[in-house]
Image: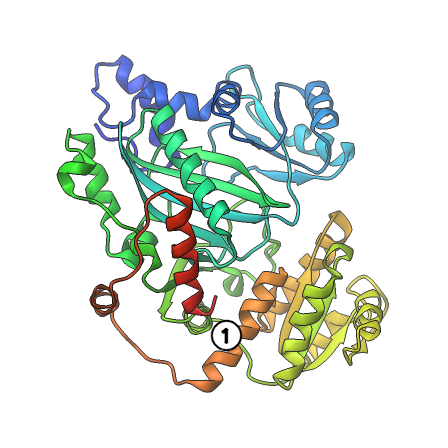
Amino acid sequence: MIVSFGGQTPLKIAKALEANGVKILGTSTEGIDLAEDRKRFGALLEELEIPCPPYGTAHDLPGALEVAQQVGYPVLVRPSYVLGGRAMEICYEDDGLREYMGKAVNVSPDHPVLIDRFLEDAFEFDVDAVCDGQAVFIGGVMQHIEEAGVHSGDSCCVLPPYAVTPQQLLTLMAYTRRLALALHVVGLLNVQYAMRDGVIYVLEVNPRASRTVPFVSKATGVPLAKIAAKLMVGRSIADLDVKGYGWAKHVAIKESVFPFPKFPTARHFLGPEMRSTGEVMGISDTFGVAFAKASMAAGTTLPQKGTVFVSLNDFDKNERAVNVVRAYVRLGFNVIATEGTSAFLHTHGVANRPVLKASEGTLNIIDVIKNGWVQLIINTPLGPVSRQDEHAIGRAAYEYKIPFITTLSAAASAAKSIEQIRSRPLEVMSVQEHHEHAAQGGGAHATETLEDCTRLVEYIKAFKM
């Protein structure tokens, strides 16, 4: 039996199947358990010298509070062996953790709660790979546009990565190779990473097919599921002649589709628990056009004119934010902003008008949205209070069909997209034609050396990332 194509559920019952005489093909149940058992996996990361955020496990409230104090707030709390981030939350203080543990179910020595230090304002990456137990093929390195803390299934992601140095790309691939071999993976492997202040941390390793496999396979033309199935029955990567990095042939962007328009009273806040019900993809030879196509396919058409609302957390009040907002001004947009952000922008010479926050008085940003005076929202939350504001703004944005952006990276991406689609008409090309066109152009190939990664990153820049 193959258990690695059905998400998390088959992994949970793999040992029971094996105990009842079922032969498990691919990665062994020992490898699966090693990746899922937080303490064993933590010891493996130490042995492999791969960093991860500080973490701990708890079986009751006192234990959870002790772990949270040790690793430091904010913390990401979740049950073990879950799919889609179910029952996963970010807690910023003891009261939030007490509330979570009060409603947590099935906490026991066999099902402890996992507590990790949450890395706010970090870049996240997904890497899909296949392994035959001895050799590893990197199917794709994707970078998320959304902030850390948004479930990977809800994040817009880009293939190839849009903001990475050659050394960082080399590290992502090297860590993936090291983990695949240490877990004795036979078949598919997905690794999720976070990068903060230039340091790359492993967040999660799944010795199974991830939801990104169809996206990566369509974007690259490499049928990862078919290759993995052949590896599970004894073939090798060398036998199948799998080579090269097809994910650097063009820009492919995966965007998530949400059910919120059908459920206007539902909580729209995006976080660790997955909310999306589908995915779409945009492909082009430039980042901006691919982003525009993906946004349109997901039901959000970026505006070509009008007013942009901006609310930045203190951490984001920097030169990069000023340049992003200036990009919208150059494109002809008016800017309104919350009081603190408005003052910050004024000190840097960016013309704007102030508006009240969602939690302040009448004629606040929610009223402005309802009156149709805003065409694009940029709101970068940090901390529990600003996230509550984000929920109110997000709900209004979905209700009135206004594009809602929560990171500077996404805001910069949208500005670049608006600029690029103004200068060229959108073109339609089938996936097969994209692969054929890329094959004629030669694409970019790399082995895991710094020299090759440098060449690959330089090649990626041609896509105007």
Q: Residue at x 77, y 36 (%)?
A: 93
**Measured along the vertical axis of the image, is residue 279 above or below residue 232?**
below
Nearest the viewer among 188 and 368 is: 188
In the image, 433: left or right of 183?
left
Among all residues in the image, which is located at the extreme front?
A: 451
In the image, 22: left or right of 377?
left
Nearest the viewer among 395 and 295 is: 295
Nearest the viewer among 75 and 95 is: 75
The count of marks equals: 1
Residue 114 seen in this snapshot: yes
In the image, 91: left or right of 130?
right
Q: Which quarter of the figure has residue 54?
A: top right
Q: Position of residue 134 (x, y in %)?
A: 26, 28
**Measured along the vertical axis of the image, is residue 431 above or below residue 278?**
below
Q: Amino acid at mark 1?
A: Ser
Q: Position of residue 336 (x, y in %)?
A: 75, 76
Nearest the viewer among 236 and 37 is: 236
For label 1, the crowd category at 10 Å Cα-Cα, with few meaning under 14, some 14 to 19 and many 20 or more, is many
Residue at the disc numbered 1: 417
SS for callout 1: helix
In the image, 327: left or right of 33?
right
**Measured along the vertical axis of the image, is residue 320 above or below residue 306?**
above
Q: Residue at x 73, y 19 (%)?
A: 62
Q: Position of residue 125 (x, y in %)?
A: 48, 47
Q: Residue at x 48, y 53 (%)?
A: 143
Colour mapping used in the image: rainbow
